[in-house]
Each structure stands twice: as C-alpha cells, then as structure tokens.
Image: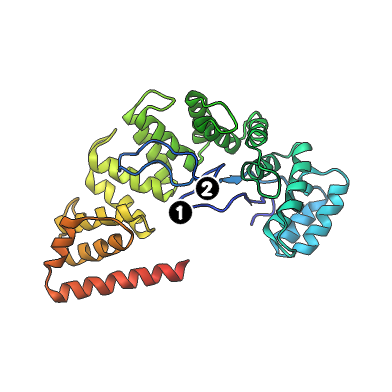
Amino acid sequence: MNKTVLALLLVVGAGAGAAAVLVATGQIALPDLVSGKSGVDDPAPAEAPAAKPMPDDDAAYMAFDQGQYLTALSLAERRAALGDPQAHTLVARIYEGGLGVGKDDITAARWYARAAELGDIPAMLAIGNMLAEGRGIGKDRVAAAAMYEKAAATGDPLANYNLGLLFLKGDGKPENPHRAAKHIQYAAEKNIAQAQYDLAALYQKGVGVEADAIAAATWMSKAARQGLVSAQYEYAVMLMRGFGLKEDESKAIPFLQTAAENGIAGAQNRLAWIHQEGAGGVPKDPAEAAKWRLIAKAGGVADEKLDLLVDALPDSQKKSAQKAAQEWQDKQLTLR
C-alpha cells in the first residue's frame, strides 16, 4: 500500500466479479442488461478515497503500511488527540479491520463519526455505509444519505455514486431516477468502473435518462476496459448482438474469454457455443466447447441443446472435456 493511500474497503463485496459502492444489501436492482441478466448482483461498496497523510512524516501510515498495526494505532491516537481527522480515520480502520486488535465495529463507528465531524471525506463514506447497514451503529438510511450527500457536495465521485443508488431506490432519499442518473453519471465520468456499468444499464432501459443504445455500449465498454468482469461479459454480448455498436464477434471473444475465466457462468456457456460453432474466427473445437459447457452447467446455466451435442461426442472426447473442466474447477478453488 502506498503510504499516502489508505484504502478503506467499507463493506465486503458480493458475487463473482462484482464491485461497487453503497449498499451491498441487494435492495437496489438496475434494469435488465442485454444479456438478459437482471441488473447488478448486490453491488458491493466501493473503496473510499484515500485518507491524506498526516503530518510528522506520515509515521502512523508508514507503520500501517509495514503491518505494524499497534505502532500505527498508538501514533494515530496521539495525532487524533490533537484533532487530526485523518488520524481518527486510521484508528477507525484499524478497529474495523481487526488489525492487531480485536475487530470492533462499534469503536470503529465512533472514530469514523468523529473523523466525519472533522471533515474527513473517507470517514463520511465509511460511517455512511455503517449507518446504511446498521453495522457498529444503529441502522439509519436517512442519516447515511446525509453523510453521502455531504461528501458528494465536495465532488467526491464515490459519494456521488452512493447517493445515486439511494435516489434510484428511494431508500433514505425520495425515489428520483433523474437525480440518481445524474450522480451515477458524475461518478462514471470520474472513472468509477461500477458506476460506468450501472450507467450503461440505465441508458439501456431509459431509467432516469433517455434510452440510448450507443451510450449504453460506450459506458459498458469503459467499465469493461477497466477490468470489471461483469461489464466484460455484458460488453461482449453487446458486440455479439450489435447493440449500440457494430456487430463484431471477433472483438467480443477476448472479453467473453476473460469473463468466462473469471467465473461468469453465462459467459462460459456463450464461449462453449463459440467453440462449438467455430464462430468469430475461433476454430471449431467440440471438446473445448464441451469443457466450457460442463463448467457453465455446474454454474447453473441450463442449455438442453448444447447438452445434447456434448452427449453425442465420442467417449474419448467427453472424458477429455470432463477432465479439463474438473481441472479448471480445481484451479479456481486454489485461487480463492
């Protein structure tokens, strides 16, 4: 970790390839995307902006970066006693993460709240998320929204994204799709990948904005190129269908491959068809198709037609595909 950056992962994310801001509660659903997948799966909170380094050569952060958490805590508490807001945030982060101390969300919330009062933007986001979830502090969506709004007023992109999600659902704020789109677009323009993905969904269905296939494809492309796996799948489907851009299967395949390798079952099944049919310049390979079909099937994707094609393969090819699929699945377990 760069000593000038303290990443505050505010809430554990959900689902393979998901990444986002506020409310990982599954209560906010965006419109269907072109793949037929419904919205964003439980968007996970994004990281808060970095806390700025404290004075005196950033000693507390240096200790934190080196894993010397108790030293960092001691130094940060001294700075906090002098009214340093970033020091309060660092103390909160240590307690929230259970870094060198027992994990203590109540204590973390208290330190974040004080840091927020002193004007620290990452702390506003952190205490906003804790209020939204009722973690370490009483659940209060309205108070959470107020925290996000305060941080958003400073131009912070993540706070704007959080606020946009609340307006989208009418949770802590009156439901207002137009305000939601405005805040989400602000975050998207600041290169927040999940905001770009969500904005693409809004443009695809015309929620809070006028429906615009070209804009949807443009924003999905931006999110995909930032490495957001769910966006890579959706963008691949857009390329394959010519949704908002020129149809081009060959350009779709690298995005589809990446999404498949990262566990997106729908991408795995589409990749199976690519190999089955030899589409997009990919050589026809029934065994490779069978491998990806078996993986997708294990992930819950139904496809009777492709199953029949796999079943019709010679035993040697089926066994080879089964072995390859198992090896892929075993590899994923080691990566978790």
**Image vertical order of residue 305 relative to residue 246, above or below:** below
**Residue that badge 2 annotates:** 44
Q: Which residue is drawn at 12% across and 69% down?
A: 313
Residue 40 on image: x %, y %: 43, 43
Residue 310 on image: x %, y %: 16, 65
Q: Quadrant of the N terminus?
A: bottom right
Residue 24 on image: x %, y %: 53, 46
**Image vertical order of residue 225 relative to residue 276, above or below:** above
Report the side of 265 relative to 314 (left or right). Answer: right
Q: Quadrant of residue 217?
A: top left
Q: Residue at x 56, y 53 (%)?
A: 12
**Residue that badge 1 annotates:** 15
**Image vertical order of residue 209 relative to residue 129, above or below:** above
Q: Residue at x 44, y 37 (%)?
A: 198
Amino acid residing under circle 2:
Ala
Q: Quadrant of residue 69?
A: bottom right
Q: Tell me whether circle 2 and circle 1 mark residues in contact (CB < 8 Å).
A: yes
Q: Label 1's element?
A: loop
Q: Label 2's element?
A: loop
Residues packed near mark 2 inside 10 Å, few (<14), some (14 to 19) or many (20 plus): many
Report the side of 165 relative to 288 (left or right). Answer: right
Q: Distance between the residues labelled 2 and 1?
A: 9 Å
Residue 238 on image: x %, y %: 29, 40
Which one is earlier in the sequence, the residue at label 2 or at label 1? 1
